[in-house]
Structures are given as C-alpha cells and as structure tokens.
Image (spheres, coloured by chain):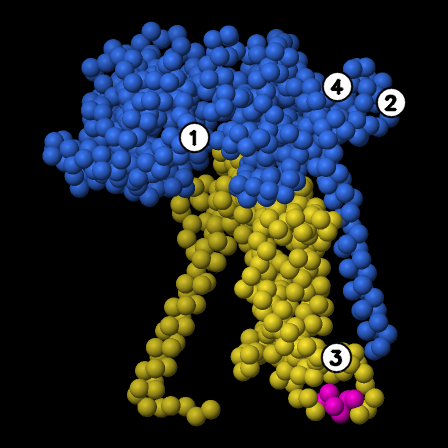
C-alpha cells in the first residue's frame, strides 16, 4: 500500500510539473508577441525553407507569422492547413496561426482578449460592425484610410461614387475606416414568393394591390380550408412587412421616401403604416395568416411549408428552393417562384423595393500589434482576392481540386463538392478555407450555391421603371447621440410593439382616430420627439 | 417502519404519490420527446407530427452529426477533460479535506477561513484569464482542469464527512504503527466510498457540462468539448446551416440535429448514474449533520 501511495504522490507531482510546463511555449510566444514592437514582429519569425521560398516573390522573401482571429459562424471550421493557408504562404509568404472564436460567445471572448492583450494581429472575418468600430475608436485597430490607395483592385470593386458612399457608411465617428467592407453582389433580395404549381392549377392570378392580395388569400382559403395562405416567420414585424412595403414604408425606422424624397424620421407613425396594420388585422381576423404569429418560431413557420399549407409570402427570393424542398414530401410536383415586382397600393405609380447597399459591413481588420510589413502583405492579400483570379480562388478554390471549367467557360464545383442537387452530401467549400473572408463573390459561386435568384431579382428591379427605392443615407451621430438613441429606441419600440399587436389582433381599432392618436401620444411619452430630433440631425449632417 | 393506516395517513400517502408521479412526468416527458424527435424523419419533425413516440423512424440525424467529425471529436474531448479533471479533483480534494477535518491540525481555523473566503470572493474572468495565461496554461488542457481543481463546496462536504469518522479508529491505527498516509489510504478512504462516489459525480457532471472555459482558453475549436458545440447548435442552429439542412430537408432536420446532439450529451451521465446510485443516495446526506 505504501508503494501505491508513493506512486500516487509521484503522479500528483508529475501532473503538476507537466501542467506548469506544458503551456510554456504558447504563453511565451504570446507574451513575447505582446511585448515585441511592431518593427520587431515583422522580422521575428523568419524561416528559410528554400523549397517554399523559391516560389515566393523576392519582395516577400521573409516568412511572416501572425495570429488571426477567425469567427466561427455556422460551425464553418476549415480543415487546416487549408487551400487559403497554402495560398497565403506561397503567394505572400504569410503564415497565420488561427484562433477560433465562436460567434455565439463573441462579446465574452473578445472582451477577455482585449483586456488581457491576448489578441492577434489579424481579424479575418468579424461580422460585428459596431464592435469593430468601437475597437477602432479605442485604438486597438489600424485605421485603413491611408492604405486604400495601395489596393487599386479592391477600390475598383465600386464606382467612385459608390466607393465614397461606402466610406461614408463604414467609417467610424472619428472618420477612420477600421475594416475592409465586402462588395455586395446583389441590390435586392426580397419579393413575393408563391406556389406557382397551385396558382397554375387553380387559375389564380398574382396580386398587384393589397385588395387583390386579400381576394386571392380568401380564394385560397376557400379552396383549401386547412391552409395558412400567407404564413409569416413569427413576430409582428414579419407579419406586417409585405404590406408596409406596399404602402412605401421601409423596414428601417427612418428612411427617405422613395417617391417624394422627404426624410421620414419614424416610419411607424406614417399613414401608410397605419394602412398596413389595417390590412394585417383583416388578414388575421379572416384566418389568412398564422393565428399564432406573435409567438410563432421557425419550426412553426417551417411546418406550414412541410404540411403543404403555405401559398404566398413576402420573403427572400432564394427561399423558393427551401420552400420546394420542405413541401415536396407532401406535394412532389410543387414549384415555387417569385414575383418580379412588389404588391403596391393603388395610389402609387409602380412599387417600392428595399434596395441594399453596395457593400456588406464586414471584412478584414488589423490590430495595433501588426507590423508594417505584415500589414502591407495582408493588404496585398485583400487586393488580390478582389481581382478575378483572387476572387475565383476564394469562392471556388483551385482548379482540379475543387472546381472544373466547363466548355462554355463557366466554373463548376467538382463532383465531390457540395451542390444542392448534384451532391447534397458533398464537401462544403469552407472546409477548404474558401468563402469565409471573401471581399467579392463571383457569379460562378453565386450560381453554384443556388443564390443566383438574388441576382435575377436585382436585375429585374433595376431594369423596371416602375420599381422605386428609398435612397440610403449614412446617418452621422455623435457618440452621445448614438447611445441616447439606442436608449430611446428601446422604450419606443416596446411601446410601439404593444400597440401594434393590439391593432393587428383587433384589441384596438386601427381605423379609429382616437386609438391611433393614443398610439402616437404613447410614442411621444416614450421619447419619440427626442429620437426624431436626433435622427433628423443625423440625416442633415449626412446631407452636408 | 410502522405504516400509518389512518385515513389522513392514507390520504397523505396518495397525495405524496401523486406529487411524485407529477414530478416524474414533467421530468421524463421532455426527455422522451427529445428522444422521439431525434429518431424521427425530417419531414415528420418539420410537419410538427412528433410527440412522445418517433414518427417515421430514422437515424439520419445521428448519421449526420457523426459524419461531420465535430461531434465525435468533441465527445472524445469531453470524456478526456472529464476523466482527467475528475481524477485531479478527487486527488486534491480528499487530500486537502482530510487534514482540515482533523482537530489537531495546527492553524486549522486559519486554513479553513482561507478556504471559505474563496466561496465568497473570486478574481473574476479577466484576472483568472491573466493568471492562467501567465502560468502558461493558455491553450492547453490544463487551463480547463486546473483552475477549478478544488471546489470549496465539495471540499467542505468531504471535510465534514471525514469529521464524522471516529477519531478512535485513527488512534488505534496509530497504536498499530500506521502513519498518516497509511491511515488516510487504508482506513479513511475505504470508509468514505459513499462520499467519494458522490463528490466524484458532482465533479464529473461539472466537467461534462462545462462549455465556457473551453471557449475562453482554447484557440482551436477542434479542442472544444461537446457542450460547447452543443451550445452553438442549440443557440444558433449552426449545425443545420453547416449541413445545408435547408436544402436536404428530406434527410436531415435542424431540430433533429439539435435533439440528437442533446441525446449524445445526455447518455454518458445517464449510463453512469445507475452504477453509483447506491452510494449516491447515502452520499447526498453526508455533511448534513455537521457544518
């Protein structure tokens, strides 16, 4: 027993010793990194594997190793070293040591990193614009304004005007740009998706006005009493959205009117919104939308499609694939399509759609720990992935490995790769490191992942003279205004939500002026006038 | 035990049974529902048809989660962290609880106060993180198993149990020539199986359910335990997107993925419980007499 006890004690000692020793490497590397000056880091991790360096341009003779924060969104973790790692090494002689960060724990992890100075040089793909701007304002990130001219291909992703607009939107309140915004490949993504097979079978006409929509929904309900003709995804926002668009009220709280050009500081007080509520109340009372829309969740919404109860909805057009897949077990011949217009009030000439910005507000950021040389190479990387060659690499990967070239010149993922019809079980592009961290999406990729419907609807709207949109403006607020606005919005939204639900569910009559005026007064009490003032100032500043 | 055969006694027994049955049902039904969904087809789940029995029996959700590699790898990580962490916990806790339970220990009160203070004050996340980093534990398994190596709560329970063991046993062993180590290993520990089993279970469940530390202390998500992955799935339905569930809804459902992962995370603990139940019932009472 004594022997046993001795072994136990020795084991304890060994564990303690290993524990204290095992982390030394990473710790020392990390601490040395944090203590090393920028200039030193640029030269610190030089290695000389001749075989690899032969293929590297002479300007990138020294290998630079940097840490990179990778936001794991939707569990997309590449198998490393990935094609991207290889390309970075071969083309720019850069080695990135990845640090994964789960999206769901973003705040906890990033705050811990910053407080302990344990953050890497590169933020690869953070999709948290507000936090990125704040980190920039606090001095953790490199301002990129002065470096933009060194990235001509990146700049060329936009026209001069669009580039300036992008800068207006994406710079922080100190006027600095702290990330590289990504080009948006589409300008619109929503319209009315409908069950074309059922429409054809029953001779139903597509509606163009709220009145026609109402008649259609009633007709559907009569033909299929168990249906929920127009299911929505849950919450009052989704229930009202299609109708508010019909009455020119966009889903952003403040906007510029698509027809008059007038600035509307709070859309939910507009007459158009009141009309949208009236229609939604009618739909609700007649059982044409989900009776439990208030508490409805994704599962409930999906079940309407899986049970074949859904017929038409204002939705993302790429959802038609999803709708068909869900509904096909109960209706194998089902076919979903989308309209190339939006339902609109008869008072309007044409219709409005929600036009998207020419950029997505996420991209690469670089921390104050990065060396000048490291930054230069990463910016070269950003510039390269903006070119045709680089964008194709980031989206499609490598020819012969992940994609092949068709006879007509288009690119197609190879057979072992994922495709919704060719190989649903195939390998996802991000397994190779692709897609996450793109700055531009190629047409081939968009088609291959089944999102070309977005391009189609964008082109349809762009070409249609009847299609109007609320022009975007980059609201400019001071830090104080921003925090006050957030505070007011919470109060106003709570109050508005309460009344809006009552209007839709018939507890209050939205057509009754007294009830509507009560609603407006309640919003005023919640601080709407102050919010309107701040928003108007923000708009005026943006207009110079 | 004498049975109370009076009307009020019988009524009381019925009420107790009804309450127990109610508690059993509200505990068991969600588990059965989770199991049923995990073994149902995607179409049935999406239609909302699944109640307490699988509809259109299918193991496609399990195939999907085991095909991606994340769940099996994180499962093994969890087993590793749980076993290693629990062994360290038990070694240190028993070895610290025993001397603290002996009244003749010099400065015993002082040590007890030192231990108790940690129950009311902690360093907080950032200082703990800095300590872990500066000790060289960051991005190693030791960052997961060492910072909480001794739980004050469990230590106090263990100490209280040891205090209940008669001092005479120790004295007689000393008369027979046993030293402290022998007394501890050959007398105290064998007499403490119930408490050791209970505390082991407390520690093991704690390690098994721990998701936060891994996210803070590991750089690579390949080191994450199952609970961290599970949390992501439950909160964000992340897995569904990974597997393009939207597009292959006929074989895999997001809900199916979520619930099958839940089942995978539940099974090990469900398997362990019956084996230590006999100790556990006795063990949970320990420490309730003295404090």
Nearer to us in this view, B68 or B133: B133
Question: Do labels 4 and 1 touch, CB within 8 Å?
Answer: no
Residue lying at 59% horizontally and 32% vertically, measured from the top left: A140
Q: Is residue B235 left or right of residue B110?
A: left
Nearer to us in this view, B10 or B217: B217
Q: Which chain is blue?
A: A
4 or 2: tag closer to the N-terminus: 2
Q: Which mark is residue A91?
A: 4
Observer-side mark, 4 or 1, equals 1
Where does the magenta region start and end? B169-174
Observer-side mark, 2 or 3, equals 3
**x, y percent for residue B152:** 60, 67
Can you identify the residue that label 2 sits on? Answer: A51
Classed neighbour count for the residue bearing mark 3: other residues with Cα under 10 Å, few (<14), some (14–19), many (≥20): some
Report in which chain the residue with disc 1 lies.
A
Whether residue A489 is visible, yes or no, is yes
Q: Which chain is yellow?
A: B
Q: Which mark is residue A417?
A: none
Label 1 and label 3: CA atoms lie apart by 64 Å
Q: Is residue A49 left or right of residue A248?
A: right
Can you identify the residue that label 3 sits on? Answer: B184
């Amino acid at each position: 027993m004594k022997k046993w006890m001795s072994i136990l004690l020795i084991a304890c000692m060994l564990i303690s010793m290993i524990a204290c020793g095992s982390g030394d490497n990473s710790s020392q590397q990390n601490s040395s990194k944090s203590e090393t000056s920028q200039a030193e880091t640029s030269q610190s991790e030089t290695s000389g594997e001749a075989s690899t360096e032969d293929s590297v341009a002479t300007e990138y003779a020294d290998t630079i190793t940097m840490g990179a924060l990778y936001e794991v969104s939707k569990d997309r973790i590449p198998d490393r070293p990935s094609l991207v790692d290889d390309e970075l090494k071969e083309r720019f002689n850069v080695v990135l040591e990845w640090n994964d960060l789960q999206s769901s724990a973003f705040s906890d992890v990033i705050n811990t990193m910053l407080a302990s100075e344990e953050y890497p040089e590169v933020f690869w793909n953070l999709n948290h614009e507000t936090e990125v701007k704040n980190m920039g304002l606090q001095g953790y990130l490199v301002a990129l304004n002065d470096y933009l001219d060194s990235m001509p291909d990146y700049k060329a992703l936009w026209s001069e005007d669009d580039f300036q607009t992008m800068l207006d939107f994406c710079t922080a309140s100190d006027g600095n740009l702290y990330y590289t915004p990504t080009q948006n490949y589409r300008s619109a993504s929503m319209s009315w998706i409908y069950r074309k097979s059922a429409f054809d079978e029953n001779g139903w006409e597509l509606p163009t006005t709220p009145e026609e929509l109402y008649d259609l929904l009633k007709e559907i309900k009569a033909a299929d009493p168990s249906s929920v003709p127009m299911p929505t995804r849950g919450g009052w926002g989704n229930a009202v959205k299609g109708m508010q668009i019909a009455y020119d009220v966009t889903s952003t709280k403040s906007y510029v009117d698509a027809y008059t050009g007038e600035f509307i500081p709070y859309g939910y007080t507009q007459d158009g919104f009141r009309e949208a509520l009236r229609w939604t109340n009618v739909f609700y009372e007649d059982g044409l939308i989900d009776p439990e829309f208030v508490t409805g969740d994704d599962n409930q919404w999906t079940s309407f499609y899986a049970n074949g109860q859904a017929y038409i909805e204002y939705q993302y057009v790429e959802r038609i694939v999803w709708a068909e897949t869900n509904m096909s077990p109960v209706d194998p011949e089902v076919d979903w399509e989308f309209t190339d217009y939006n339902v609109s009030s008869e008072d309007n000439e044409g219709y409005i759609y929600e036009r998207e910005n020419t950029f997505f507000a996420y991209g690469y950021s670089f921390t104050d720990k990065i060396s000048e040389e490291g930054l230069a190479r990463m910016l070269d990387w950003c510039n390269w992935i903006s070119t045709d060659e680089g964008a194709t690499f980031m989206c499609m990967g490598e020819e012969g490995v992940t994609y092949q070239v068709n006879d007509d010149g288009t690119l197609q993922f190879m057979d072992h790769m994922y495709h919704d019809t060719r190989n649903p079980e195939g390998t996802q592009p991000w397994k190779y490191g692709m897609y996450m961290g793109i700055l531009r999406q190629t047409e081939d990729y968009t088609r291959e992942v089944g999102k070309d419907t977005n391009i189609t609807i964008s082109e349809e709207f762009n070409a249609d003279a009847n299609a109007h949109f609320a022009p975007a403006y980059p609201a400019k607020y001071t830090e104080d205004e921003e925090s006050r606005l957030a505070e007011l919005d919470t109060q106003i939204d709570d109050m508005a939500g309460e009344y809006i639900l009552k209007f839709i569910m018939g507890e209050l009559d939205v057509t009754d002026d007294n009830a509507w005026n009560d609603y407006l007064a309640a919003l005023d009490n919640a601080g709407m006038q102050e919010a309107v003032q701040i928003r108007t100032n923000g708009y005026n500043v943006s207009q110079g | 035990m004498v049975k109370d055969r009076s009307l009020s006694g019988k009524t009381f027994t019925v009420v107790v049974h009804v309450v127990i049955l109610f508690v059993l049902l509200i505990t068991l039904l969600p588990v059965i529902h989770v199991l049923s969904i995990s073994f149902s087809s995607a179409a049935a789940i999406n239609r909302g048809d699944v109640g307490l029995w699988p509809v259109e029996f299918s193991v496609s959700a399990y195939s999907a989660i085991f095909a991606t590699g994340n769940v099996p790898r994180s499962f093994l990580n969890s087993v590793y962290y749980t076993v290693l962490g629990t062994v360290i916990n038990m070694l240190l806790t028993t070895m610290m609880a025993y001397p603290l339970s002996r009244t003749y220990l010099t400065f015993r009160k002082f040590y007890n106060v030192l231990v108790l203070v940690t129950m009311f004050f902690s360093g907080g996340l950032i200082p703990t993180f800095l300590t872990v980093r500066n000790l060289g534990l960051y991005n190693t398994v030791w960052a997961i198993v060492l910072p909480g190596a001794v739980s004050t709560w469990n230590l106090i329970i263990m100490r209280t149990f040891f205090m209940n063991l008669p001092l005479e046993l120790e004295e007689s062993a000393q008369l027979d020539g046993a030293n402290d180590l022998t007394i501890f290993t050959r007398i105290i520990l064998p007499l403490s199986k119930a408490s050791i089993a209970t505390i082991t279970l407390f520690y093991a469940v704690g390690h098994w359910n721990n998701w936060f530390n891994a996210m803070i202390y590991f750089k690579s998500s390949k080191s994450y335990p199952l609970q961290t992955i599970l949390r992501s799935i439950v909160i964000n339905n992340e897995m569904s997107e990974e597997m393009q569930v939207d597009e292959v809804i006929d074989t895999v459902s997001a809900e199916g993925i979520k619930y099958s992962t839940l089942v995978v995370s539940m099974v090990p603990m469900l398997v362990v419980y019956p084996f230590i139940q006999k100790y556990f019932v006795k063990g949970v009472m320990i420490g309730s007499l003295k404090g």
